[in-house]
Amino acid sequence: MLSYRHAFHAGNYADVLKHLVVCRILDYLTQKPAPLRYIDTHAGAGVYRLDSEEALRNAEFRHGIGMLWGRNDLPATLAAYRDLVAEFNEGDVLQQYPGSPWFAQRLLRAQDRLELCELHPRDFPSLQRLFRDDRRTACRFEDGFEHSLALVPPHERRALVLIDPSYELKQDYTRVVDHVRSLHRRFATGVYAVWYPLVEARRVKTLEAAFINSGMRRIHLYEVCLTAHHAGRGMSGAGMVVVNPPWKLRKELREALAYFAPLVSETGRPIFRCVELAGE
């Protein structure tokens, strides 16, 4: 269960989608002055060297953030995300890639708080080092599913919860939906963002149907794919489900993915989805 290491995949197209969604949600949530809680159930190491042996094994970042690096025609949302990665690198050379916690830390304010959970014994010390000087941030060597339930409803009464397991276990596709439902019952106005890989169409259809039938309202789904077919040949796309999304998110992501999807598609044509699974 703890064999997954994100260092092999950091900065790939799935990370671009995930972090673009997280950044846009936080940008909207921080427009109001009231404090906010960010909860990351599977925070990872927090930072990844792109010149490491792990990152260079398949060099997945070249087919992700690398496709956006140095471009001057990006839509505003993609440009803002790419510029944050450039800020993290402190220069024009793409040498390292930040995890979700860094994007959140960078966009949140003094009155906001971060709760970061990670159980991998090699990744957790790196996470601690990255945030050791930030009093807003608590790093927890705990199960993120269990700890996040103890954190809602938050004192701030506003929160984004990112749920990003490795999906090494097949039941994670149903577990994430059950978990969001449990969180939602406790805190119905929270924003919940779930990342998932497209490995088998059957599993993704099960996840999608479970969200549709969950009884929760205001649910969006965003996907970007390498190919239209995703069965029996490994991961061929990635998606995000967002419960209680900001009202402009769908329009912005449609524009961003229309630009990004053809860059990573095996056919050169954009293969992506921005759909509403449940309305008001």
Image: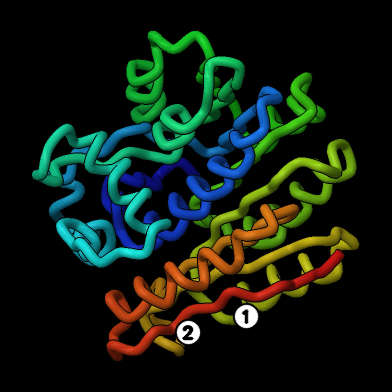
Nearest the viewer among 145 and 81 is 81
Split into 4 quadrants, where in the image is the C terminus?
Answer: bottom right
Where is residue 267 drawn, in percent x and y?
30, 90
Which of the two discs, 2 and 1, labels the residue nearer the N terminus? 1
Q: Position of residue 40 (x, y in %)?
A: 56, 35
Q: Which residue is mark 2?
A: 231
Residues at circles 2 and 1 in contact by the CB criterion of under 8 Å: yes
Report the side of 133 relative to 57 (left or right): right
Amino acid type at mark 2? Ala
The numbered mark at residue 23 is none
Location of residue 211 with respect to 163 vertically, above or below: below
Is 127 positioned to the left or the right of 145 in the image? left
The residue drawn where x is 76% and y is 41% is 190
Q: In this orientation, does residue 150 appear? A: no
Q: Give the class, few, some or many, for how many residues have Cα within 10 Å of label 1's Cα (few <14, many ≥20).
A: few
Residue 54: percent from left, percent from top: 19, 47
The correct choice, above or below, for 32 with respect to 53 in the image is above
Q: Residue at x 63, y 39 (%)?
A: 29
Secondary structure under badge 2?
loop
Question: Which label number is shown at residue 202?
Answer: 1
Cα–Cα span, label 2 and label 1: 8 Å
Give percent across and percent down for residue 92.
Answer: 10, 44
**Is 244 left, or right, of 2 in this rendering?**
right
Task: Please name the amino acid that badge 1 sits on.
Answer: Arg
Is residue 9 something one can see in this rendering?
yes
Determine the image quadrant of residue 61: bottom left
- Secondary structure category for the residue under label 1: helix
* Residue at the image point whose x is 47% and y is 32% from the top: 107
Mark 2 Cα within 10 Å, few/some/many (few <14, many 20+)? Answer: few
Q: Is residue 129 above or below residue 22?
A: above
